[in-house]
Image (tube, grey):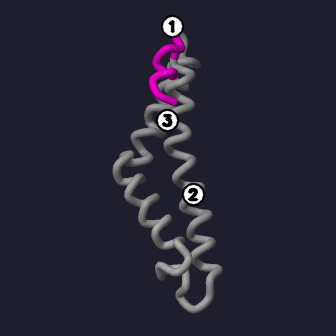
Amino acid sequence: LGNRWQQVPGPAPKARLSAGMCFDPTRQRFVLNGGLASIPGGGGVTTDFGLAHAWATSRTLRLADGPDEVHRRAVARIEFKKHSPG
């Protein structure tokens, strides 16, 4: 993605980027939790299958990315500006 979103004028790329930063990790967490729960005998939390490592990595990236509320607020501000009079 690089800085291409900065080269496009207008707020649309920023809104799409913020929405992706909020939705994608949430979906990833849902999929990983389903995978962890589907392996019987606690296999999902061992290093045998790699799911525990994937979950830990995704959790670390979520912490580094910042809270979802910030991204939701950014999208809301852009949308409110689009639809506000003036």
Look at mark 1 in the image and give the residue it sits on: 86
Q: Nearer the viewer, mark 1 or mark 2?
A: 2
Count of numbered circles on the image: 3
Which numbered mark, 2 or 3, is in the foreground of this view? 2
Measured in 3D between alpha carbons, the distance from the residue under mark 1 to the one under mark 2, in whole angstroms, is 39 Å
Which tag, 3 or 1, sits closer to the chain's start? 3
Tell me the tag on residue 28: 2
* 86 and 22: which is toward the camera: 22
Q: Residues within 10 Å of mark 2 (few under 14, many from 20)?
A: some
Tag 1 secondary structure: loop
* Farthest residue, direction right: 38
- Is 31 contained in the magenta span? no
Q: Nearer the viewer, mark 3 or mark 1?
A: 3
Q: Which residues are magenta?
A: 1-10
The residue at the far front in this view is 48
Kindly identify the residue that appears in the image at 51 percent across and 45 percent down: 22
Q: Which residue is mark 3?
A: 18
Can you say whether 64 is above or below 41 in the image? Answer: above
Q: Tag 3: residue type?
A: Ser
Q: Is residue 33 above or below residue 74?
A: below
Asked which quadrant contains residue 13, the reply is: top right
In the image, is 13 to the left or to the right of 62?
right
Disc ID at residue 46 = none
What is the crowding at mark 3: few (fewer than 14 residues within 10 Å), some, or many (at least 20)? some
Instruction: Report the residue at 56% width, 48% height from top.
Output: 24
Secondary structure under badge 2? helix
